[in-house]
Image (cartoon, rainbow, N blue to C red):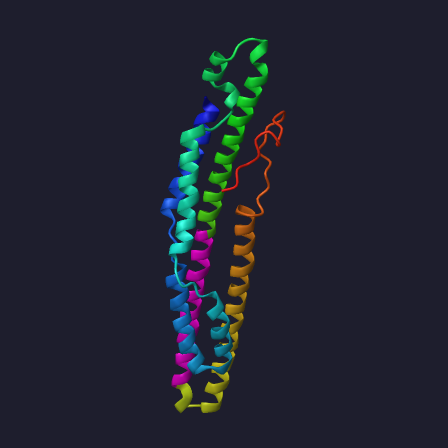
Amino acid sequence: MNKARTGREKAQAAEHEARAVRSKAALQSSRTAAMLKVAAGLSFTAAMGAMLWASAVIRNDEVLDNHVDYWANMARDLDDLFGAGDPTGREALAAAWAGEAMEAADKKLRAFMTAGIQLTDLAVAHAYDLAQAVETLNYVHDLAFALTVAEVMWLLCARLSYTINPVGALGLQEMIGRKLTTTIMVLHTTLVGVMGAVLYAGMDGQPQPFRPEGVPAQDFPMVEV
């Protein structure tokens, strides 16, 4: 029963995590793009960063939030149906089946319950992984916006020095623009690499090591959802 409570707590924690984390990548990526347009008007080299960032702009957060909610709801519903933990410890099963004639049916039922719990655990893992991915996405976009704003401020300061030293100001602007473009390249690579790895590990590429020893995989294969 302790294992069942632990599994239920995991499902509830995954649902809470998913509900608490909302994507703000669309807002922040658009704000960063707007600041990069300002930078592009001040520096030719910064324009390359603006063009690169255009591919990182997220148009709508709703799709990602809906995926997180889907797996959180799936984890909750499966937990309500199957519970969680070790089905061999359930009193209902122990009381319902007795005698040698029931052993084969008992094994099948236990395997079915185990397969259901496996699917519950998988849904919990997906919900949690997606929520963590959204948090990482939010952090990177927040960082990109903050760094872009800082570099744009430096570009504006360099522009103000045009009346004193036009040649030096132009060189300083292009240097700042190159730095900004380099920063955007690093952040863009981080978004593609880290988020791709996290989402692949949490979704399509997640291994299936959940089957307890003695429960054959071919009896009750994992349900595709």
Image position, residue 119 (x, y; %): 51, 35
What's drawn in magenta, residue-wise? 134-160
**Residue at point 43% right, 49% down?**
67
Toward the top, the furthest residue is 99
**Residue at point 43% right, 38% down?**
75
**Residue at point 61% right, 26% down?**
215
Is residue 77 placed above or below 204 in the rendered structure? above
Image position, residue 125 (x, y; %): 49, 41
**Is 81 covered by the magenta stretch?**
no
Does the rendering let one see residue 138?
Answer: yes
**Is 135 covered by the magenta stretch?**
yes
Does the rendering let one see residue 14?
Answer: no
Image position, residue 177 (x, y; %): 49, 77
Image position, residue 46 (x, y; %): 48, 77
**Residue at point 41% right, 45% down?**
70
Is residue 87 placed above or below 142 in the rendered structure? above
Of the 4 image quadrants, the one containing the N terminus is top left
Res 216 quadrant in image: top right
Dominant secondary structure (helix, strand or loop) of the stretch shown in magenta: helix
Is residue 163 placed above or below 119 in the rendered structure? below
